[in-house]
Image (cartoon, rainbow, N blue to C red):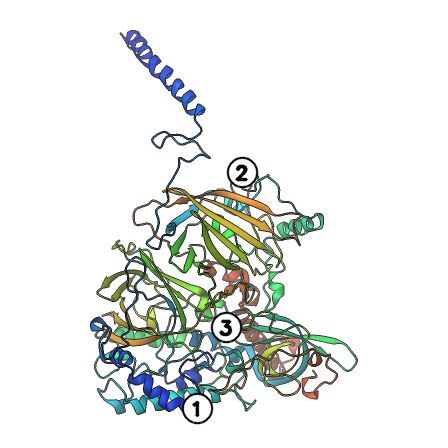
Amino acid sequence: MKATAVFVFLFACTPIVVQAQTAVQQRAARTAPAASAIPTPGQFPPYKVPHMADGKPDLNGIWQAFVAADIDVQDHDAQAGPHPEIMGAYGAWPGGQGIVEGGEIPYKPEALEKKKANAEKRMVVNITSDPHRHDTGDPELKCYRPGVPRANYLPFPFQITQSRDNIIIVYEFGHVLRTIYMKENDPEAPKEAPADSWLGWSRGHFEGDTLVVDSTGFVPYTWFDRAGDYHSDALHVIERYTPASPYHIMYEATIDDPKVFTRPWKVSFPLYRRMEKNIQLVDFNCEEFVEKLLYGPYFKDPSK
Amino acid sequence: MRVALALGMLGVGLALVVTAVPVQAHHAFAATFDTAKPVVVHCVITKVELINPHSWFWCDEKATDGTLTNWGFEGGSPNSLIRHGVTKNTIPTGTELVIQGYQSKAFEHKGVGVNMTFPDGRKFLFGGSAPGAEGEVATPTKDEIAPTSKNDAASKK
Amino acid sequence: MANRFWVSSGALATMIVAILLTPAFVAAQAKSAAAAKAPAANNKTWTLPHTPDGQPDLQGYWTSLSFTPMERPAKYGNREFLTDEEAAQIYKEGVQHSYEFTFNDFGDTPVYDATVYALSAWQEGVAPNRRTSLVVDPPDGTIPPLTPEAAKVREAFRKTGPNQDYADPNAPVKADTSTDLNLGERCLSFGGPPILPGAYNSDFHIIQSPGNVLIEYEWGNEPRIIPLDGSPHLASNIHAWHGDSRGHWEGNTLVVETTNFRPGATFQGANAKTLKIKEYFTRVDQNTIEYKFTIDDPSTWTKPWSAIVPLSQIKGPIFEYACTENNNDAVNILAGARAADKAAAEKAKKTSGVPVSQK
């Protein structure tokens, strides 16, 4: 009885298995899958972006990247993380496929030495009341503003609020706020950065359905990841945000810094719309978690 | 400014506010700077930091024997300056200043810049601008940018 | 110049009176926010602008700075508004004081000259206000009494909280660890709610999208995102430094309710569990938002109370305010306290009479 049941089961399954293989072959033959089919990574069916009342593509929402680029924008293995004897798996860092198009960051040879020095000293925090406070230590560790484009690939959500004249991005990490000036010839937002900043001076416009953001005026203190990848005050970033589906923005950033790199280079990855009902950002005010790290040496009793 | 007093002058009552209203951001000036240690420093700008919560001006003071001492002086938040058209290019390195201030309690060559003028006595940036007058953004000419040649005795340590 | 109310001393009085008499200004000061609408007193009627998706437009750069005291001086009794002459006089005196406070006497307190940095009130764009006080309810313009338990909490905080002795700038400041500094000095949080006048950089950027109003405070570039979609508040065991806000439009007034405050970081030390703040934003003319807030915490104040803070338009931009990144203050305050500790210890050794080797 049992053997018969098994035989019948196998016989019944066979045509389904055969049909499934045919469907897979069919999918592989098409370049753009139909919307109802299982998506193929890297491919999107044609998408018409909803527009806002002023006619511009609507990027409002809460978005998040799911790459391991904050650890290292290039390909990397998983690693133990700091103090594994206490932190165990809590503190271990995942491996990841890189987001750098072409694979490698084109450092000038002498600039690569500084990247290595950065990495070696990424947890050396020496906070003085002068610019030397920035000499060593990953700014992310200190809860400093992560810079651009790193803010967009931290493992935290961010919220885009889009009005006609301004797009403001609020990052859950440290409630960092970034303003993108959208008005052409805005007397309050000159083309050139009035002063340098951690998130740069950003001006944006739309090209079709793509938001293009051009940023300059960066302080030289942010890093691109925990691996010590860095830039100078000559950094110039051009980002492109292209909605690819109701749930995805395809993001890319071109990084140009002739003081550090031999040529411009690009990172790209999808941004995912956070779809939890009633999703909102939750405070991650990391400043309060780093006070002992930053100021401990100046406490009356540094052991406290 | 002694913000508590300034607010009193503004007429805004100082109800006890626990959340960080700007008035509280300066209560510990007394812990930071020493009223018993006034300084007058003639120096040449080496770095301008238009940063928050306070701007900082780094400035080389040249002793009569030629040695340089780099001082750092705290100023105000630069955000209103930026709204008034000041940029990172407004104050070039090499600008000569006379800074009257108070030394910090902990660091010998850091202080707060109370009075900042050019050597000819003109106020720095918008200093001394009276209501109704156009504020001056004093960009020094090439003639005004020169190494300091004298030292006020009060600034010697 | 930065302050649109200041042309020249000679024309000042005339100009202020003219502004105070404009129909919009009078209307803004004489009506409650909920009932405000564009006045039709003359041909040049101002029309309330709307965003492309139809919301009343609150967008732009605004300052909450004014010379109006929080609580009403007793001499005004229940009078809510100044006369035109009184308002002009108070404004003129306020501006003059903020200019004079420029440390012509070097022997004054050890702080930088605010006018150098265009941070004095008039340089920052302070606007005149016809109110006798910010507090409008209770009708005598004073904040209601504290409950007995709240009074105890506040007294305890005075004794153990971050040193707030403003009276004597030379009083020793306790700074053993960073937790002895206040939230601003630690770059932890700025900006309410509620919105109040600050000494400087008292500025806001408001933008609106179809689903949200976003208020950015200049200090720290602190964001408040106010959803308009009627979604429920955060669960009660998730807290926020600025509370959790939900907004909706009632006519031309944006009504915002905020809860979920974080214990230890509440307005005037109120009870985070029971505190509710309600805010009302109404644009009453091109340059003015009438902003009203109501504080409701029965465990702190014996009854709810309200204040109206005018928000006046200013020129932007609001530049980056990277606080923790360059917080030299925290280092200098703590290091200064350590230097004072060291000096006190050395003085004790010298004066104690006991040889050092026997200590």
Camera-nearest label, 1 or 2: 1
Mark 3 or mark 1, which has the lower sequence index?
A: 1
Left or right of C60, for residue A87: right
The mark closer to the camera, 3 or 1, is 1
Q: State the SS at label 3.
A: loop
Left or right of A145, for residue C199:
left
Q: Please give the residue where the numbered disc 3 appears in the rendered image.
A: C175
Q: Amino acid at mark 2?
A: Gln
**In the image, residue B155 above or below residue A97:** below
Query: C268 or A59, which lies in front?
Result: A59
Query: Residue farthest to the front?
Result: C43
Q: Residue at x 31, y 92 (%)?
A: C85
User: Dot 1: what SS?
Assistant: helix
Q: Is residue C206 above or below residue C19?
A: above
Q: Going by the picture, which residue comes out furthest to the right?
A: B65
Q: Are marks 1 and 2 in contact (CB under 8 Å)?
A: no
Residue A97, disc:
2
Respond whether the residues carrying marks 3 and 2 are from the same subunit: no
Q: Which mark is residue B53?
A: none
Which residue is painted at 48% across and 65% down in the image?
A: A189
A168 or A186, nearer to the observer: A186
Identify the image quadrant of residue A3: top left
> In this orientation, does residue A80 appear?
yes
| Between C337 and A171, the one nearer to me in the picture | A171
Which disc number belongs to residue C9? Answer: 1
Residue A187 in percent (x, y) is at 47, 68
The kind of residue on which mark 3 rests is Ala
Residue C238, position as x, y percentages in the image? 33, 56
How far apart are the two marked residues, 3 and 1, measured between alpha carbons?
45 Å
Q: Chain of mark 1?
A: C
